[in-house]
Image: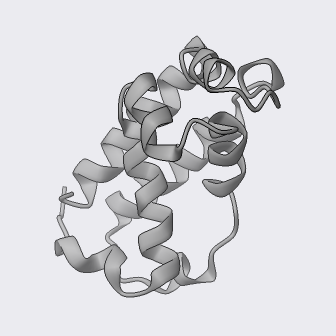
Amino acid sequence: MTNMPKTVFHSSESAAWFIGHVRSLAMSPKECCEDQGSYLVATELFHFLQEPLPVLDELAMSDDQRDALKRLRACVGRVPPEARNSDTSAAASLADMSHAAWDAPRRAARDLLLALGQ
């Protein structure tokens, strides 16, 4: 696996914003919720991590890194509605992020961070 410099995602605010959400998802459910402010965490991550960001297509990434990004987005896209409740409480956010459907996206987020040397 080819590693790119750690700064690959820091070439723009949009990319840094995106990778910040990837880092949050890679955390434990409790840490993720705390990092994201415990407000609609699953719903926001579901949408934010699938949002088209043209800057991601323009970055110099290896094929392995692009594949890891695609896998993450695909995993997030498979999270069912029952794992991304619209309740705004901290308890609901923690319950959502503790749902088993987030296990694969969490692993994919960690894999992407490793591929990026983060």
Residue sitting at x 19%, y 71%: 6
How many numbered callouts?
0
Where's the N terminus, which quadrant? bottom left
29 relative position to 38: left or right: left
Q: How is the image coloured?
A: one colour
Residue 8 occupies quadrant: bottom left
Rendered image quadrant of residue 107? top left
Q: Quadrant of the C terminus?
A: bottom left
Q: Position of residue 55 (x, y in %)?
A: 54, 83
Q: Is residue 84 left or right of residue 32?
A: right
x and y, in percent, of residue 76 in the image: 62, 39
Query: How far across and how far down the image is residue 74, in percent?
Result: 62, 43
In the figure, 71 relative to 3: above or below? Answer: above
Rendered residue at 74%/28% (across/down): 84
- Tell me if residue 47 comes above or below residue 65 in the rendering: above
Query: Depth check: 2 or 59 in front?
Result: 59
Return the x and y of residue 38 as percentages of the image width and height.
57, 35
The one of 95 and 99 positioned closer to us in this rendering: 95
Residue at 18% x, 59% y is: 117
What residue lies at 44% left-to-right and 51% top-to-bottom? 22
- Quarter-wise, where is residue 96 in the image? top right
